Image (cartoon, rainbow, N blue to C red):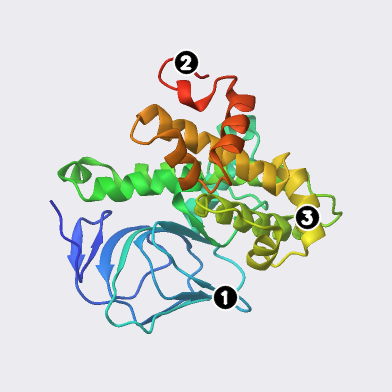
Amino acid sequence: MAVYTDTYYNHFTGKYHGEDSPMHREQNYLLRYTKHLPSYSYDLENMTIAYYYKGHGDILWKDRRQTLKDDCFLVTNPIGDDWFYDNKDIGKRLDTFCVVVTPALKKQFEKYYLGRSCHLLDDPFTSINDELIFIERAFSANHYPVGLLLKNFFESSNTEQFESLNAEEIVITVLNGLYNNHITAYRLARRIPSKKSSTRLETLKRLLVAREYIHDNLHSKVSLDELTRVSSLSKFHLFESFKCVFRKTPHQYANHVKLEKAKELLINGQYSVGHVAVMLGFSDIYSFSRLFKNKYSVPPSLIGKHTIP
């Protein structure tokens, strides 16, 4: 099994190198590494898609700063502001699976998805003016299909089977997953009542942060004030926009996710009903049981004896 500690491995070339080396605009990269990076400035016109099994330090854009957490992924567009990675903790390494896409490959990808099918057959390599712009932010990998895809490739990279996987096919698979993920995001953004698309996308980014916060805090009762703080949206803007996008209020959405998790835990049979209710932050077993039965038409005490759809 490959070891990536204090080294870079590029799956396109099949080579390892220990020191930071210049990256070239004309090359695609599929990098795997576990290294301490004190800082890194990225100003190429290439697109970057990275999964961090172990993440720390901060990503900085022109007016934004975000701390990288474990089990997250990041997308940066090849246009706009350069980004900078800053890490002051010398005792920790980034454990990373990273895809770097050349402008040429990204343009071919856009040509395929944005061009008309008849035009693609006539001339599949001419450029187009449209460009796919992806939401730039670090997201929790477990909450998005493309995050789970990147996580799967990361796990494959730790096995002997990784050598048999084709680097270019991995990149194309990741781009397909990213495209589908963001098409879904753009469709959700259209539900937000704003005339400007940039405002809708910015609001959606903040709503996704609020949604992730709910998923990451299933053990407690999340308040609107907490969601307002983490999303930087006003309470009323958050409430109305969240309801428009996800078709549920934040409280309803939190209960929905908690009950889905409760069903999973009870089917596995490791915990009692009371234990599950406490684990998921319900005020008491009676309110939990009532909500559960309303959703699934079966009381939680009978899980295992009835089939739940």
Taking the image as shown, residue 225 lies to the left or right of residue 44, namely: right
Amino acid type of the residue that numbered disc 3 sits on in the rendered structure: Ser
235 left or right of 82 in image: right
Residue on which the image places disc 1? 61
Q: Provide the secondary structure element on which disc 1 rests.
A: loop
Disc number for residue 239: none
Rendering coords of residue 74 (x, y %) = 48, 60
Residue behind mark 3: 197
Is residue 166 visible in the rendered image? The answer is yes
Count of labels in the image? 3
**In the depicted view, which residue is nearer to us: 123 or 166?**
166
Sequence order check, earlier mark of 2 and 1: 1
Amino acid at circle 2: Thr
- For residue 203, which quarter of the picture? bottom right
Residue 175 visible, this angle: no
Whole-Å distance between the Cαs marked 2 and 1?
A: 49 Å
**Residue at image point 60% right, 53% down:** 221
Task: Give the structural element (helix, strand or loop) at label 2.
Answer: loop
Looking at the rendered image, the disc whose residue lies closer to the viewer, 3 or 2, is 2
User: How far apart are the two marked residues, 3 and 2, measured between alpha carbons?
Assistant: 44 Å
Sequence order check, earlier mark of 3 and 2: 3
Q: Is residue 85 above or below residue 291?
A: below
Q: CA distance from mark 3 to mark 1?
A: 21 Å
Which dot marks residue 307? 2
* Image coords of residue 218 (percent x, y): 52, 49
What type is the residue that disc 1 sits on?
Trp
Q: Quadrant of residue 291?
A: top right
Q: Is residue 86 above or below residue 246?
A: below
Q: Nearer the viewer, residue 276 or 90?
A: 276
